[in-house]
Every structure is written in structure tokens, then in C-alpha cells.
Amino acid sequence: MIIVMNANAPKASIDRVVAEIERMGAQAHLSQGKFRTVIGAVGEEANLDNNHLASLDGVEKVVPIMKPYKLASREFHEDDSVVEIGGAGKTPSVKIGGSHAACIAGPCAVENEEMLYKIARHVRDGGATVLRGGVYKPRTSPYSFQGLGLQALKWMRACGDELGMPICVEVMDTRQVADMEPYVDCFQIGARNMQNFDLLREVGKTRRSVLLKRGLAATVKDWLLSAEYVLSQGNRKVLLCERGIKTFEDSSRYSLDITSVPVTKQLSHLPIVIDPSHCCGKRDWVPAVAKAGMASGADAVIIEVHYNPAEAQCDGPQALLPPVFKSLMSQLKLIAGLEKKEFSEIGELTPA
Ligand code: PEP
Ligand code: MN
């Protein structure tokens, strides 16, 4: 349930409500709106005494949240959340959500140090402000390239620092979280791991941002419940990523569910990132789908880029060539403007 406080309720009243929620064996999560504080009480509803909570000083009303996800819901947080990637150490922070748009780009996988720096410079020059690159790859075949692991992650960190870009890297297993945490700014949870609940809890305990891809056969409700796993551990920096789902259609790799953008925006305050690369599986279609994604109200895009896709170890056919990426970005900026959003620019980012 949520406890809506009166406008300008004093801190002492808020603290009292939090203490009472905890006494009843639930967790209290605060959401600070423009005018008032909303407190989410998460736990066994049966143990929560609404009449008692409603009678406390400063409480305007107590409202049950009917949805199975609570902290991810619009009821809990009315305004669009703005999630930051980066901001620790020397890394600048990039905001995503509300009026803040951004592009996350880079190779599918880090193949060696030189190619990483080369692609990173290309995407930075094209207008990306967050660098992506996989170091543990979830491949369908165990004989395909699996990623270079921690060594590649260290290159990602150094490259991001040198170019002033926070980094987003996929984590596949709970055992990798502690090793990766000192290096990453944003953990990517891949589509195949969307319901790896232990992994969701583990990244939820960190203070890094989490890009949560929608599962290949997950409903919007499943996806938001997975986000709830992360949020319930106290990590509020969750970004949802629509990357296409399995349908009967087999002319493209997956089907991007564009409708999920307005649907999810209505249900949740979390920012949405569109991944046109993985749903298309073929570079020819990526620009059209990226533009449709931004026009549907998404807050960001994540795009794979390679200067020599024919030789790429992973996902070469869908990687955009740097000049195509750059011209796509100039179009995405125009579309974002129509949606009252503005892409972050490298020049305006300042180290934290
Ligand atoms: C990726 O981003 O390279 C990736 C493997 O994505 P997904 O989990 O969406 O397939
Ligand atoms: Mn990929």
C-alpha cells in the first residue's frame, strides 16, 4: 500500500510513519514528489494496519496498490523517474528519463583493446554518451565466442574514463556481481536473465544503475515484477529495455513490441530504453526501428556499432557502421525534440 502524506508534512511525521511501517514488519520506501511525499509500505499486506496508519499525523490517505508490482508502479511515483548512469569517481553522470534522452552505444562484445577504443571514439563522435560492450556473452551455442571477461571489463573502464563516458556491461551470474561492481556504472541484465531472481536481488543490493532487458517471452507485467525485485532491494536506478520478443514472425530476429512503450509508461515511472539492434538482427532495419522507438516515447536507445562488422565475433549483421550511426543520431535528436526530450551531449557532461 502507499501512504500519501499531506503537502509539506514535516519530517517528524514522515519518520513516524516509516517507524510504524517497520514495526509492522514491512519495508518503507520513500518517493519525494514535487509537492508531497508518498511512502510505499512493502511486505505482507495482512500485517499492515491501514486504520492505524491513516490516523497518524500528517497522513492524507492510505491507498492499496492493486498491481502486483508496487515500487515500479505509477501509483507509488507519479512523476517520470530520472535515472543516472555514472557519477562515481571521475565518471560523468548521464541522466535518462523525463526530459533527458541519451544514446548508449558500442560493440556487442569487446574483442580486443584496440577495437574497443576505435568503436568508442566513433560512437562518442556520433553522439552517444554511454559506452556499451559485452565481456560475458550469453550465446546460444557453448562453442560461440563467450567474451573476454574481467580483462575486457578493465579495458572498458579505462576507455570510458579516457573518453568521459560511463559504461554499461552485461552481468550474467550472481558470482560476477562483486567482481564487476567496482568497474561498471550500469549492469545490463540480458533478456535471457530477466527472471534470474537471485541475480536481480544481487544487483539490487549494489548502487550501480541496472538496465533490465525484457525477456524473450515475458509480458509487461513479468518485466515490471522483475524490476520490482531490483527496486525492493533499495536500488532505485532501474531502466527498462524493450529489445523485442518472440512471436510467430520470423522475418526479423525478434518483434519489437512498440506498444509496450506507452503501455509501460502508463503503468510505471521507470525510464524506457529501446534496443533496435537485437530485435532486427540486420543493420538495414535498425535506423527505422530506432526512430519509431524514440517517437513512441522511449527515453533512450542502445545501439550496436562496429567499423568492420564482417569480422565481428558477435552480432556483426546488426551492427551499424559509424557513419550510419552518426546520421541516425542527428535524426533521433529531432524526434526527441518532438517528444520534449533532449539528448545529453558529451561536451556538457562534467565529472562528478
Ligand atoms: C546484448 O546486448 O548484446 C544482448 C545479448 O542482448 P539481449 O539480452 O537483449 O539478447
Ligand atoms: Mn549483441
Image: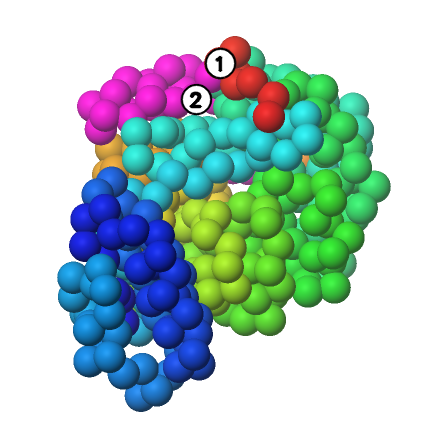
Question: For this rendering, which residue is in front, 56 or 339?
Answer: 56
For image coordinates 35% across by 87% down, the residue present is: 47
Q: Quadrant of residue 301?
A: top left
**Residue at 23%, 46% in the rendered image:** 8
Does the image show residue 144?
no
The amino acid beneath tag 2 is Ser
- Furthest residue to the bottom? 46
Number of the label disc, if any, that sits on residue 344: 2
At label 1, the amino acid type is Glu
Could you tell me how far apart the alpha carbons at marks 1 and 2 are, in whole angstroms?
A: 7 Å
User: Pointer 1 and pointer 2: residues touching (CB < 8 Å)?
Assistant: yes
Q: Assess mark 1: CB under 8 A from ligand 1?
A: no
- Quarter of the image for the N terminus: give it: bottom left
Q: Residue at x 65, y 59 (%)?
A: 172
Residue 329 position within the rendered picture, expressed as x and y whole percent measured from the top left: 41, 20
Q: Is residue 329 above or below residue 139?
A: above
The kind of secondary structure element at disc 1 is: helix
Helix, strand or loop for the magenta stretch, by majority: helix
Q: Which residues are magenta?
A: 316-345
Would you say 147 lies left or right of 268 here? right
Report the mark closest to the observer, 1 or 2: 1
Rendered-image quadrant of the C terminus? top right
In this figure, which residue is indicated by the disc labeled 1? 348
Closer to the camera in the image, 171 or 326: 171
On whether residue 66 falls in the magenta region, the answer is no
Q: Residues within 10 Å of mark 2 (few under 14, many from 20)?
A: many
Residue displayed at 72% across by 33% down: 156
Out of 103 and 249, give the one closest to the viewer.
103
Q: Is residue 228 above or below residue 109?
A: below
Question: Within the magenta stretch, is there residue 342?
Answer: yes
